Amino acid sequence: MRNLTKISLLCGVIMFTAFSCEEDNGVPIKSTEGYIVGFDPCTINHQYRIGYVIVSIDLKDTLVTYNLSDNNYKMPASVVFKRDTLYQIPWLYFQNYRGCPFSPDTLRYKYGVKISYSIANENEKVYNWCTTDMIFLTIYDQVIIKSATKY
């Protein structure tokens, strides 16, 4: 009976540590797998650092990030993290869908990513000045990418 209690306790500790979030300076670090399914049109139209829209595989989370792209506006747009290019997205992708933040179904599952991230706090959020774009991505969580790999 004692061995069963020890095994149960050990399994509980392992499950707790496996399913809990890491923390970075007290900020929870989350992870997900998903797809880059669009971009912030304002960032293309006004040549800001590109903001990408990522949706989780289970379609439960839609996230927006501005730190996954090149620091400077470049085309074709590199989806990078610490100088490692994950994808080179062609200019046509942005040109053809300039007014819409979401890609068409044919491109929806082309750019798979596995990311770890934290929810951006108020002083980390990006607010670009866009007078002609009527797309508001503020309804989605803005995140800071900590690491990214393609899958």
Image (spheres, rainbow, N blue to C red):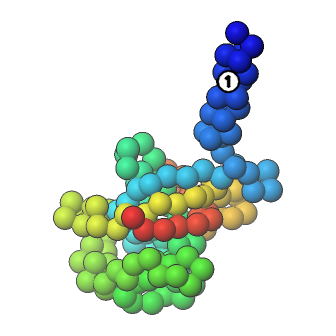
Answer few, some or many: residues within 10 Å of disc 1's Cα (few below 14, many 20 plus, some between 14 and 19): few
- The N terminus sits in image quarter: top right
Instruction: Name which quarter of the figure residue 74 lies in.
Output: bottom left
| Extreme residue toward the right, this view | 25
Q: Position of residue 95 (x, y in %)?
A: 28, 81
Residue type highlighted by circle 1: Ile
Residue positioned 31% across, 70% down in the render: 99
- The C terminus sits in image quarter: bottom left
Q: In this rendering, does residue 135 appear at all? A: no
Seen in the picture, residue 134 relative to 85 is either above or below; the reply is above
Left or right? Give the position of 23 relative to 144: right
Q: Position of residue 60 (x, y in %)?
A: 42, 42
Seen in the picture, residue 15 relative to 90 is either above or below; the reply is above
Instruction: Name which quarter of the figure residue 39 lies in.
Output: bottom left
Q: Position of residue 103 (x, y in %)?
A: 28, 65
Left or right? Give the position of 143 relative to 42: right
Judge by depth and name the residue closer to the eye, 11 or 24.
11
Q: Position of residue 26 (x, y in %)?
A: 79, 50
Left or right? Give the position of 71 relative to 100: right
Q: Which residue is mark 1?
A: 7
